[in-house]
Structures are given as structure tokens and as C-alpha cells.
Image: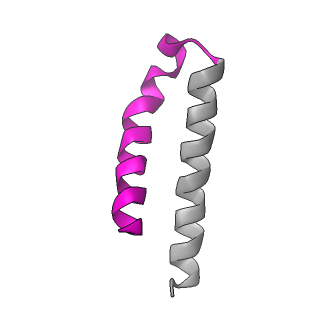
């Protein structure tokens, strides 16, 4: 079972990924482009954490 700090960290990362995905849907890509590298990094981190 994950420790409380790991659980909170995972929730923060999940929140960022969800909010970034919503941002990409709502605003033009040029405005949201700076978020994309961090979004991709966090998606990979979540995948590795779950596997």
C-alpha cells in the first residue's frame, strides 16, 4: 500500500494531467503548448507508477 505522501503526490499529478487535458481542449494549441511537455512527462510517470 502506498504511503500517504505517495498518495498525495499521485493525486496532484493526476489533477495536473486532467486539468492540462481540459486546457488543451478549451484553448488554442498555441496558448497551451508550454504545458504539453510537462503533461507528457507526467503521463509517463503515472504509467510507470501504476505498472
**Snapshot quadrant of residue 41:** top left
User: Is 37 left or right of 28, judged from the image as shown?
Assistant: left
User: Is 25 left or right of 50, judged from the image as shown?
Assistant: right
Magenta residues span 27-51
| 28 part of magenta stretch | yes
Residue found at x 61% / y 23%: 25
Residue 30 lies, in percent from the top left, at: 48, 11
Vertical position of residue 17 compared to residue 21: above or below: below
Query: Camera-side residue: 41 or 50?
Result: 50
Vertical position of residue 39 compared to residue 29: above or below: below
| 47 part of magenta stretch | yes
Give the colouring mode of the picture. one colour
Residue found at x 36% / y 34%: 37
- Count every numbered label the image shows and give the total: 0
Residue found at x 56% / y 54%: 14
Please, what is the dominant secondary structure of the magenta stretch? helix
Residue found at x 63% / y 39%: 19
Quarter occupied by the C terminus: bottom left
Residue 9 lies, in percent from the top left, at: 53, 66
Vertical position of residue 12 compared to residue 24: above or below: below
Residue 15 lies, in percent from the top left, at: 62, 51
Residue furthest to the front: 51
Residue 23 lies, in percent from the top left, at: 61, 28
Vertical position of residue 27 compared to residue 37: above or below: above
Amino acid at each position: 500500500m502506498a504511503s500517504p505522501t505517495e498518495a498525495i503526490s499521485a493525486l496532484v499529478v493526476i489533477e495536473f494531467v486532467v486539468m492540462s487535458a481540459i486546457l488543451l481542449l478549451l484553448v488554442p494549441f498555441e496558448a497551451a503548448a508550454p504545458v504539453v511537455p510537462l503533461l507528457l512527462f507526467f503521463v509517463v510517470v503515472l504509467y510507470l507508477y501504476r505498472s
